[in-house]
Image: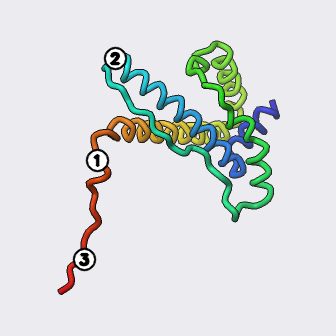
Amino acid sequence: MQDTFDLAGTFSSRKASAVRRSIALKLSDVLYQFGKDYLRDHFQFEVQNIELVSQTVPSQSSSASEKAFTDDMKSLTNCSDKVDITLLRSKQMQALLQTLVARLRTKPLLMIYTGWVGFTMICYAMAIAAHKLLVASFDGYFDRTSKTSPQLITV
């Protein structure tokens, strides 16, 4: 039971912010692909592929422990396998989350804080995915070469 509290506390800690951001970016890639496939299948709207940088590099001002923590967790977030969204619907994942919530009920403040952190992470991932989808959808409609810089008028 103590492991559950430690896991929830570590997930919500400041040190884990780089890991949460990486997980959210991977989740946004999955949501973007899901939205792209949905638009193609249901609306016959083909979204162009665009290359977006979704990797974050720890800043130079970060402490050594934060860099080491980020480096240790890269194996969790920098996988090249395609993540399957059916993982969220699996019985094992639902049982794991139900067990986690049941154990955290004895510490309601930690449960609320961990839930809030997870909620904001999911909202961040959805916002990034929606932005990518909008940019990719309307990328062909705008002509980038016609942009001209404003000219200075001398009086």
Q: Relative to 115, is 62 above or below?
A: below
Identify the residue at the far bottom of this view. Answer: 155
Q: Residues within 10 Å of mark 2 (few under 14, many from 20)?
A: few
The quarter of the picture where residue 137 lies is top left
Q: Which residue is mark 2?
A: 42
Q: Give the foreground label among 2 and 1.
A: 1
In the figure, is residue 53 to the left or right of 42?
right
Outermost residue to the right: 2
The answer to whether the residue labelled 2 contacts the one labelled 1, judged by CB atoms less than 8 Å apart, is no
Q: Residue 89 at x, y = what percent?
A: 57, 16
Secondary structure, mark 1, is loop
Q: Give the distance between the C-alpha atoms of the residues marked 1 and 3, in whole angstroms.
A: 23 Å
Give the residue at x 43% y 22%. 37
In space, the residues marked 2 and 1 are separated at their CA atoms by 27 Å
Indicate which disc, 1 or 3, sits on the residue closer to the N terminus.
1
Above or below: residue 5 compared with residue 68: above
**Residue located 49% across and 40% down the image:** 51
- Please state which of residues 24 and 45 is positioned toward the viewer in this rendering: 45
State the image coordinates of residue 108 (x, y, percent, origin top left). Answer: 65, 37
Q: Amino acid at mark 1?
A: Asp
Which residue has dot 1 on it? 143
Q: Comparing marks 2 and 3, which lies closer to the viewer?
A: 3
**What residue is drawn where x is 64% and y is 12%?**
91
